[in-house]
Amino acid sequence: MSARPETSTAPIRLADYTPPAWRVSDVALEFDLGIDSSEVTAHLTVHSDVDAPLRLDGEGLELLSIAADGAPLDASRWRHTDHVLEVSGMRDGSVLTTRVRVQPAANTALEGLYLSGSREAGFLLTQCEAEGFRHITFFPDRPDVLARYTVTLRADKARFPVLLAGGNPDGAGELPDGRHWARFVDPHPKPSYLFALVAGRLEKIERDYVTAEGRAVKLVIWSEANAIDSCHYAMDALERSMRWDEQAYGRSYDLDVFHVVATHDFNMGAMENKGLNIFNAKYLLADPDTTTDDEYKAVEAVVAHEYFHNWSGNRVTCRDWFQLSLKEGLTVFREQQFSADMNSTALKRIEDVALLRRAQFPEDAGPLAHPVRPAEYREINNFYTATVYEKGAELVRMLAGRLGTEGFRRGMDRYFADNDGRAATLEDFLGALGTANGIDLMPYLAWYGQSGTPRLRARGRYDEGTQRYMLTLSQYTPPSASQPDKHAVPIPVKLALFDRDGNMLPLHLDGEARGTEAVMVLDASERSFTFEQVPHAPVPSLLRGFSAPVLLECDYAPAELALLLTHDPDGFNRWEAGQQLAARAFDDCRTGGAEALDAWSGALKRLFGEPGLDAALLADLLTPPGEIELAERQEAVDPARIHELRQTMQSRLGGAIGAEALERRYRELCASGPLVLDAAGKARRRLQRRVLELLALVSVDTAHALADAQYRSARGMTDRLAALGILVRGGAAEASDALADFRRRHADNPLAMDKWFAVQAQIPGEPALGRVQTLERDPAFTLKNPNRARALLGTFASGNPSGFHRADGAGYRLLAERLATLDSLNPQIAARLATAFNGWQRLEPVRRDMARQALSDLAGRPGLSRNLSEIVASVLS
Ligand code: 0A1
Ligand code: ZN
């Protein structure tokens, strides 16, 4: 598995897994750091009981010297080809020493050792997951090789005053010529992808923390000097995460120090390197003037996610990259539980299900579909997907639901105990959860091996004479190219029955009273369940809490959905009924129908006037599914038409509530006084924004005037950006002044400037392209910074369907051309942005031809990276 064949792009297959021939017990690394050139000496203590050459991965390394057990190696003993160093004649317990040179400043791929920021003021850092360590030194760069790391850093003290690596500090001192050194020892064996170092001019904030086990830990957050005041919220979030993991899972931190570093140059959200987490600044820095309420939540969630990896990922790691969801799905689930506990269970579930539908369902429905545990890949970086993360979390949620709170905890304790210090598999996970509870969970493995979103069909039949209600559930997963025959998977269906007045009925199933909510597991293609003592035809509420990641097909009458939307005591289920009803209302807009549209807007008008309904929940109830989700339900997708119809249905909603009522509510919600970041303040701002958006559809001039005033008087970024968005997306006359003001105010803050680019990339319809082209020429725009590239091009291509999918194909051509340029700088980011083309096969014919043409032109360009070519080839297939 390690040392992939140099020239071929043959896929790596799960079925081909073999354990490593050589293990590494200890690694001693010495870094002589410089911006243009850094030298890395690695001493590897290697072990094997088979007679095979030692094969090490290495890419882009200039080999300076090689020795075994202290003596230079004869040329006949080693061979260095493109990506592999092969050494023969090594003995069990030998120490191999290599010295290599790498070039951090020239590394624009941000993988391995690279420079963040400018040559003069920037700092050096590493990113190793998944296969970046091979860009730093020769090593068996696979997660099942766990070793103890000792890391010594040496550098010029004035240029690199701060030297950090994972593990506990183990000495520091001065060297001649203004240089200095620092050493770190990590007592916990770890895979190479968790290695990290940071070196440069950084400021810090610190906090002392004592774990539940009594260990004193120094928590330190580092950033460049101008951002250090924005690190306090992350520090609080970190402390909350540590406490929560102790209480919810009995997991304590296990080193004496925990370092966290913010960088503006990062390919992903953040990275859980052992003892030295590195964050995209977007998910670490927070201050009221530049951070929105949603971003505050994201910071808390990502801080928690990375911290939770210390157990789910680091102490127990993955045997191979096919098992990626073992750490990612589990850690996303743990973060979801934490965020629900810190904020609101219903709102968090709404947010997560909306994300699943927006990002994962489309992925699972098209050519990029893959199982949560893929069977093969060419470029592992392309598999950090919504399927592995979000669908993976849904699978853990199903297992947790099946076991109940105590059973799941028992199972997790067993999983951690049995697999601590090991590289585990999904079988180990299901095995531990099952064994601890005396339950066979292996049938759930089917979920991990099969792509596609199952359809769950529900049919109810009521018999007045017997007072029985029979519910028949069946499942079907459409075939895909690599999996023509899909199997039935176990689907837990949480259910309640409502009477006509909206009360929950007691459930009697198989002669047993089951309270008012029950879980039935559909473990075959079809099953029927009979409820007794049902006084009249009930309205079933199915998949409560979104108990399984499936698409529900059920012939509800609009009035039945309206009843659930109005009466279900659970916020999430209310929202869910509203989403289903809204989708039907959208169909009405398309076909000229009225029943669902009236039921939807009527129910929401009533809820709008209901006192005591949580403001944040109301805001979410008032939001129909997005354009991407609505497109999922169509054939021959025309994104411009979907945008127009969605606007129409929202103006019908606005009209039903009434401009006056909207304006009145808006004014009531406008707060005076200082900005408060508590739940009530966030909820109020969320509703205020939604109300103003609806008002803009029914009384545009009033709404724009209010938005302009809100922009100018806003006390924080949430209100300021909400107002700016309404002005810019609505094409208001006031938009250009507001944009100019925003730019002046925030010119020095890259995260705020990303928002300035993104908001303009969201202008709907034809004008978007011209705006994007203008912004590309803005001096503040650069393709080299992933956040900036994503803010403009990512928002345009993935967050603005009516803008990107122009009928003339110019959006497609622009993206394809930029991807080619970006690919030569940063293949990971190019590949990720290219997924915006997913779904092109389902576009209406004119756009489909344009998209195909742009994609095939891109595919035909010579020299594309493995990252981008894999995505483009898959999307085209
Ligand atoms: N393990 C990280 C995700 C991550 C993956 C790859 C990276 O570099 C290209 C960086 C981060 C997480 O789940 O947070
Ligand atoms: Zn993760």
Image (cartoon, helix red, strand yellow):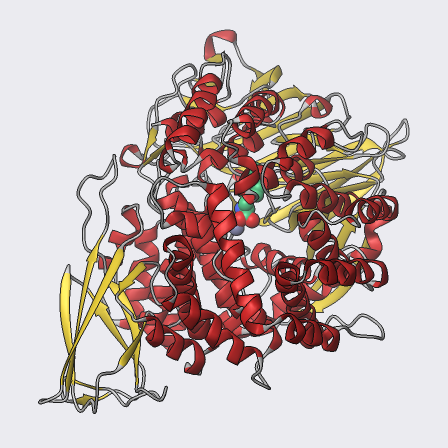
Q: Is residue 120 shown left or right of residue 455?
A: right
**Image mark count:** 0
As drawn, 602 above or below 352 = below
Q: Residue at x 46, y 76 (%)?
A: 603
The answer to whether any part of residue 752 appears in the image is yes
Residue at the extreme top:
76
Question: Can you say whether 716 is above or below 753 in the image?
Answer: below
722 displayed left or right of 511: right
Quick check: can you spot residue 91? no
* Residue 102 percent across, percent down from the top left: 66, 21
Q: Position of residue 786 (x, y in %)?
A: 65, 36
Q: 436 or 264: nearer the eye? A: 264
- Looking at the rendered image, the quarter that the C terminus falls into is top left
Relative image position of residue 399 (x, y in whole percent): 33, 65
Q: Nearer the viewer, residue 92 or 273?
A: 273
User: Which picture quadrant has residue 874?
Assistant: top left
Q: Please, is residue 669 above or below residue 177 in the view?
A: below
Q: Quadrant of residue 92?
A: top left
Q: Quadrant of the N terminus?
A: top left
Closer-to-camera residue (815/236): 815
Q: In the depicted view, which residue is nearer to us: 173 or 83? A: 83
The picture places residue 631, in percent across and down from the top left corner, at 42, 47
**For the point 57% across and 19% down, which residue is it?**
67
